[in-house]
Amino acid sequence: MSFPAFDLAAFEAARQDARHAMASVLDQHCRDTGFLVLQGHGVDPQVIDDAWHAAAAFFALPPEEKRRLAPPYQGYPYGYLGPDAEALARSKGKETPPDLKESFNGGPLSVPADAGSDALAFCYQPTLWPELPDFRAAWEAYYAAMEQLAARIMRAFAAALQLPENHFDPFIAHPISALRALHYPATTAAPLNKQQRAGAHTDYGSLTILLPQSGSQGLQVMQDDEWVDVPAPEGAFVINIGDLMARWTADRWVSTLHRVVARPGQMDRQSLAFFHQPDWDAQIVPLDGSDAYPPVRSGPYLMQKFQATGV
C-alpha cells in the first residue's frame, strides 16, 4: 500500500475549497487506516533533537540506575519500565510473553486547581526524574511542543469531521496526555513464541504522535488481515487514531491494531510516543448522536485500559 500522508502546515494555510478538500482527504485516511505520516508539523528541530538525545542518554545508564526510577507501586503510571514489565497484547485479551522493550514515562506538566482525587491519584502523579543534566528541560520542552501539536491536529480532525474547527477545544483544556520514550534492545536470539518488541494493540486515547527513529523498521499496522510496514521518514511524525476517538466517531474512524515486530538479528531502536488524552472529566459521547457506545469519562476510561497491560 502507498502509506497515507498529510501536510498540516499546508492545511492550515489553505482556504475555502482547498481546505475542504484537504479535510476530506484527512477524513478518508482516518476511515481507511487510522494511521498517517504527518508532514509540515512545524515543531522546532532543536526541541526534537534535545529530547531524542536526552532519551538516549537515559537508556545508556547502567540498569541499576534506571531501576531507581521504577514505579514505586503497581499501577503508578510514570517512571522506568524495564524488560519483562509490560505485555501490550494483554490489553486486547491476548496472553503473550512480556514485550522486548524498556521505557521511560512522564505525565502532564501542570495540575489543574480543580483536579479531583481520582485524577490526582493517577494521571497527576509526579514524573520521576533521572539525575541527568538537562534531561528534565528537554523532556518538558518536547512534551509542551507535542501538546501544542496535538491541539492543532484536533482542529484539523474537527474540520475532517465537518465540525467547527474549535469543537474539541473544550475537551482538551487540561489534557491528561503522557509521553513515553521507548528503547527496543538489539535482538540476538529468536524471540519466544508470540513475543514481540511491542505486542499487537490499539492505543487508548484520542490520537498518538509517534517519532520513530529515522529509517527504522519494525512498526506494522494490520490492514486487510496483513501486517503492513509503517515508514519512518526523516523529519516527520507518524499519527494514529486511538480507541477513544474511534468511540467518539462511532467507528467512522478506526483505531488500528499495530505492533513492533521482533525478529532475530535486529539492531536496537528508539522512539518517542505522545499519547494525547482529553481532560479527565471530558464526557465522550458519539458525535453522530447514536447509541453506538455508552458515554465514558476520559480519565477513568484511560485508567482501566492502562491497568490491563501490566505483567
Image (cartoon, rainbow, N blue to C red):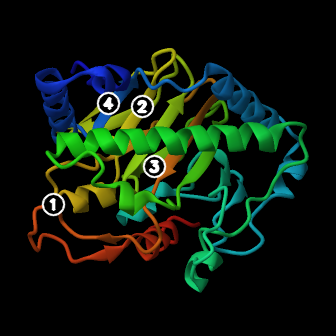
- Residue occupying image coordinates x 70% and y 44%: 140
- N-terminal of the pair, mark 2 or mark 3, is 3
> Which disc number belongs to residue 36?
4
Residue 70 in picture, x, y percent from top left: 77, 61
Badges 2 and 3: C-beta atoms under 8 Å apart?
no
The residue mark sitting in front, 1 or 3, is 1
The amino acid type found where label 4 is placed reads Leu
Badges 4 and 2: C-beta atoms under 8 Å apart?
yes
Q: CA distance from mark 1 to mark 4?
A: 20 Å
**Which residue of the protein is positioned furthest toward the front in this rendering?**
15
- N-terminal of the pair, mark 1 or mark 3, is 3
The amino acid type found where label 3 is placed reads Gly
- Compared to 59, does 301 lie above or below? below
Give the labeled residue for mark 2.
238
Residue 188 in picture, x, y percent from top left: 65, 30
Badges 1 and 3: C-beta atoms under 8 Å apart?
no
- Residue occupying image coordinates x 61% and y 74%: 122
Residue 3 in picture, x, y percent from top left: 27, 22
- N-terminal of the pair, mark 1 or mark 4, is 4
- N-terminal of the pair, mark 2 or mark 1, is 2
Circle 4 SS class:
strand
